[in-house]
Amino acid sequence: MHKTSGNTSYSHIIKYTGLFGGVQFLTILLGIVRNKLVAMLLGPSGMGLVSLFNSTTKMMSDATGLGIQTSGVRNMSDAYQNGDKKQMAHTVKLIRSWSIVTAIIGTVLCIILSPFLNNWTFSWGNHTLHYVLLSPVIGLTAITGGEMAVMKGTRQLKSLASISVFHVLLALLISVPLYFYLGESGIIPSLVLMALTLMVLTIAYSWRMFPLRLSFGKSFLHEGWGMIRLGVGFVVALLMGSLAEFVIRSFLNNNGSLEILGLYNAGYMISMTYGGMVFAAMETDYFPRISAVNDDNRSFNLLVNKQIEVSLLIVAPLLVMLIIFLPILVPLLFSGRFVGVVPMVQVSVLALYMRAIKLPLSYIPLAKGDSLFYLFIEGFYAVGIIIMSIIGFNMWGLFGTGVALAVMSVVDFIMLAACMRVKYGFKFSTRVMNMAARQLPIGLLAYALSWMEESILYYTLGLILAGISAFLSFQSLKKKTRLMQYLKQRFH
């Protein structure tokens, strides 16, 4: 029997949030170099094209993957928690077999639907062949997702961290030469090779733990039904999220321009990907742990509140710094042609405060196996963000899409908090509410500074706010963990 008591401690959460936050930081540094070079080589229009292809393949992967990358984690986590090696080996076979099936289905469907994808995505040119050539990405992603589920469910967290670092390094080495020599013609081979690289890296680690075994016998459908039933609810929710991104990007491409889309994609990448690097530990470490205690309401509530606390404490000072230094960061991350995206990113960063609180909540239905309710909450957000993004863009252009992200995050949080309270009896701890009451106003003040024109005063006040936020977080972490002893040991 694997012990879980230690897994609910602040120290455990901080350790693995730090591990994956650190890995994300390293991968983002490498990604920054890659994106900087890609932005210089392709410009906003080229990055817009990459964004369209990525969002379309993600939508197809989500639609055909049956949610195995998530439901498989829950199944593996249960077997691992019980210490049943025979059941673990059987679950691995089941996950891998279904991953192969979904890989074949996804690849074939992408080829069949390529003319429709072309018509839905582009208002110019014929890109049908491009989608046909991208079809292997769907299959490779499905196999990778299955192996990732096995590794997450068995807590192979350091291996997952290594895969993340190696993949982004290889992506840099693959994509930049292709874009340098082929320009926009290098986009398709680059995306295929990066998907292949991630799959090879993942199976290299996963197959060492569990050698390749498949099972397509009579029990294949029957035994996989529980996993697929949960996964289908998840996949529909994922599909709605991917579809929302697809609709928004297609809208911007058709009603704005490919350059506007490239700017939006850069802004979204900075705020939601770079700014959200601390949340990398959520799916990798938090979801298996919360699944393991889903029947114990007291431990369940305690774990969710602790995860919110740690996420907010770590992310708050980083978000203040991000808001303040975006006018400097954007030209460094991309190029001078992307400075127009700064106002959009500064307001959208406010959404990450809400995300730190609401993301742990959104995993509760999945941990409880309630796929229909998870489908509802994800559908609510998908529909809301499409409507608000269209309204925001029509009213204020690119800046309006950032306002849409910030406003929708608040609306979504209110809905989530109410639903989790009524359906699962979850309530926020006093510590979480006090912490939010201290950190959220600092973020709002930092954003208010972005309207100042006096640069010296702007950066001076911004640094003061960042210092206050960091001090509050450090004091809280020091009280909850052996942080000072750990730091002293590291320095010695």
Image (tube, rainbow, N blue to C red):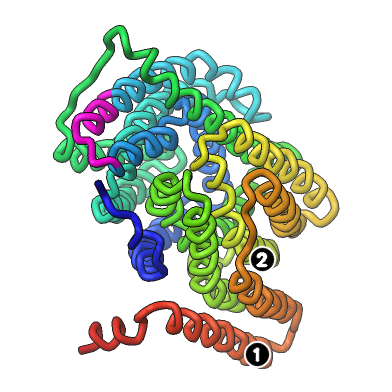
Disc sitting over residue 350 in the figure: 2
Give percent across and percent down for residue 405.
69, 55
354 lies left or right of 328: right
Between 405 and 362, the one lying in front of the other is 362
Q: Quadrant of the C terminus?
A: bottom left
Please name the amino acid that badge 2 sits on: Leu
Give percent across and percent down for residue 157.
29, 53
How packed mark 2 is, by other alpha carbons closer than 10 Å (few <14, some 14-19, many 20 or more), is many
Rendered residue at 65%/90% (across/down): 461
- Residue 245, compared with residue 60, is above or below; it is below
Q: How many marks?
A: 2
Which label sits in the foreground, 2 or 1? 2
What is the span of residues highlighted in magenta in the rendered image? 82-93
Rendered residue at 45%/60% (across/down): 36
154 lies left or right of 231: left
473 lies left or right of 403: left
SS of the residue at dot 2? helix
The kind of secondary structure the magenta stretch mainly shows is helix
Give percent across and percent down for residue 436.
64, 72
Disc sitting over residue 416 in the figure: none
- Residue 102, compared with residue 264, is above or below; it is above
Rendered residue at 33%/45% (across/down): 152
Viewer can see residue 130? no
Q: Residue furthest right?
A: 395
Disc sitting over residue 461 in the figure: 1
**In which quadrant of the rendered view does residue 488 lie?**
bottom left
SS of the residue at dot 1? helix
Rendered residue at 68%/51% (across/down): 421
